[in-house]
Amino acid sequence: MGETNNHHDIDIILRKTAIVDFAIGFILLIIHGPAADQGFPAIGLISLAGSALLSYLLLCKDKHVGHIIQINIEGSLKSRYITITDAVTAFTLLLVLICSWAALGRRWQDSGLIILGTYGTVPIMISCGIHFYFFLSPIIETYQKGLRYCQHCRGTLNADISASCGSKGKYAAVPDDEEAGGSEASLQLIATPDAGADCKCG
């Protein structure tokens, strides 16, 4: 329960950071764009605005603005849409970053504008990292849950696996490919018939 609350706190902080990030980026990029007379990195304001809008809507989803939606790739269809939106925003910001760095590199003679434009890309980088976090974290969590899943009792493995699930069966070497001669072997849990009822690894 505490771990879930920590995740919620981190989500809230990151979403609020994305909103503040837009405000900082707006000041820097709105100055750099007309002065440099070029589109990048000022075009990044569009993506930053989308990032801030998404974060604001998610924060306002709850009446108290203190409990953010838990983004989970195994969750509801609405959560999947949010994850996809985070992914699209992250890759869009990454594309803007690449184009911005390329554009700034062509203006190497204007050192002042390069410095201002480089500072302007910092909020884009921060928002890009935030949305990649929201996009990748549920995928990583789902993968880790799969590694901790016990095929024996259909539960989640814990630190006492050796004293619970492991004690109800034994591991035996089973060939990976019996038709090919089975030169390599893998470990497979061979459980007793009543092991599933007594397994405490969940």
Image (tube, rainbow, N blue to C red):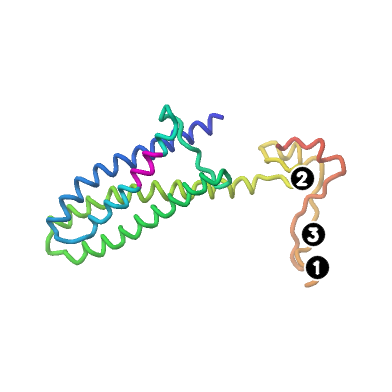
Query: CB under 8 Å between callouts 1 and 3?
Result: no
Q: Nearer the viewer, residue 91 or 173?
A: 91
Q: Is residue 137 magenta?
A: no
- Mark 2 element type: loop
Asked which quadrant contains residue 112, the reply is bottom left
Q: Give the amino acid type for the residue marked by disc 1 in the picture.
A: Glu
Which numbered marker is on residue 178? 1
> Which residue is found at the position 19% from the left and 45% from the top?
27
Instruction: Give the left or right position of residue 176, taking residue 26 as reference.
Output: right
Q: Give the amino acid type for the residue marked by disc 2 in the picture.
A: His
Report the Cα–Cα distance between label 2 and label 3. Answer: 17 Å
Q: Is residue 156 above or below residue 107?
A: above
Q: Going by the picture, which residue comes out furthest to the right?
A: 193
Q: Give the amino acid type for the residue marked by disc 3 in the picture.
A: Val
Q: Quadrant of the N terminus?
A: top right
- Residue matched to label 2: 152
- Observer-side mark, 2 or 1, equals 2
Q: In the image, residue 129 lies at what x, y percent? A: 38, 49
Query: Magenta region, mostly helix, strand or loop?
Result: helix
Tag count: 3
- Residue matched to label 3: 174
Q: Is residue 123 above or below residue 15?
A: below
> Which residue is found at the position 43% from the left and 38% from the top?
11
